[in-house]
Image (cartoon, grey):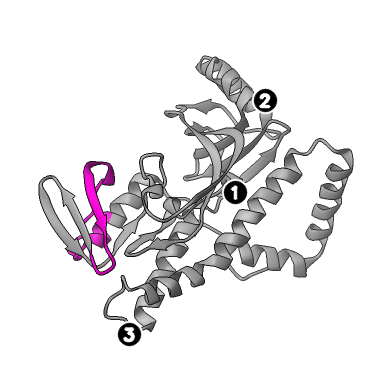
Amino acid sequence: DIYKRELAFMVKEEDLMAEVELSLDGLPLQIIDQSHATIENHETFIKVIHKNEVTYSRICLWCDGSSKGKVEQFNIVKKEKDYHQHAITFNFFSDRSYKNQATQFFFKDSVLALLPISEYEVSVVWSCDDHLIEKLKLLDEQQFVEELSARITYDIGSISKVGVKNFFPIKQVLVSNLFDKRILLLGDAAHTIHPMAGQGLNMGIRDIQSLERLIESTNYIDIGARGFLRKYERSRQLDITQFSKLTVSLHWLFSSSSLLIKEIIRKSFKIVNSNDSIKSFLIRKAAT
């Protein structure tokens, strides 16, 4: 419909990070763990004290969205929505070929996404209500595989080599503004959304692309200047707002117990699937 062989690519985190580090090698950038640094945010410069070394810069790109990356120390307010869910991420191998086809299952208590990263290896993102998470944590390996298999409505083959399971709470976190003086928020520090839409990393990449385009298209000598950062903020507001509202709406729809809502969803999918114009529009939007 959109003349593409694929809609997206799955990349292992270690491979992605290796490419990122290679791309950054030799550039005039300093990457620091802010939990071990003192950062002074001034109107005309940034002062960083890290490992007894002092560095001055025109801008600081703040990407840490974890609890230790506290943006509240600046004039930035976090707005959080707690979904009362946790996500489990892990990989497994199967003796069945997945042929590069991603699948997502919606249940009353969870959303399960199977994302092939090779012919026989699958990455899993399982977003679960808190009560289901507590149940899954008590299962041994065999019981966990049985629970996973029971949720999947087609033959997934024999599951083996279940990798390390990572658990994290699911919250939507947005911020009142994307910059303060010379601190600019990117990635998870600027926006965290529900993983069901699969757009978290993609939004962070679009942050970088927007920043790069703005640097190339303007004649700002100082990219830490308020005028430049305000232009960047405006360039990202629509995308962030659209996808944050989309994920909230999708979560509300698919977690609803209303029979009327379920019937509306069923009929809506039927209409979309039978209308090439609507389908193409949605595919193009997801693929950008």
Mark 2–mark 3 Cα distance, whole angstroms, equals 58 Å
Disc on the earlier residue, 3 or 1: 1
Residue 14 location, quadrant: top left
Vertical side of 6 occupied by 154: above or below: above
Q: Nearer the viewer, mark 3 or mark 1?
A: 3
Q: Nearer the viewer, mark 2 or mark 3?
A: 3
Do the numbered discs 1 and 2 sit on residues whose CB atoms are within 8 Å? no
Residue 139 position, x and y percent, is: 55, 15
Q: Which mark is residue 150?
A: 2
Residue 142 location, quadrant: top right
User: Which stretch is magenta?
Assistant: 21-45
Q: Dot 2, crowdedness within 10 Å: few (<14), some or many (≥20)?
A: few
Vertical side of 232 occupied by 164: above or below: above
Q: Quadrant of the C terminus?
A: bottom right
Nearest the viewer among 24 and 217 is: 217
Q: Residue at x 58, y 24 (%)?
A: 133
Q: Is residue 251 magenta?
A: no
Residue ID for mark 3:
219
- Kind of residue at disc 2: Ala
Residue ID for mark 1:
101
Residue 16 position, x and y percent, is: 36, 52
Q: Residue at x 54, y 27 (%)?
A: 159
Work out whether residue 116 can be spotted: yes
Vertical side of 182 occupied by 269: above or below: above
Residue 99 position, x and y percent, is: 57, 47
Element at badge 1? loop
Q: Residue at x 57, y 20 (%)?
A: 134
Q: Is residue 39 magenta?
A: yes
Side of 217 where 2 appears, left or right: right
Residue 72 position, x and y percent, is: 41, 48
Q: Residue at x 40, y 42 (%)?
A: 66
Work out whether residue 288 can be spotted: no
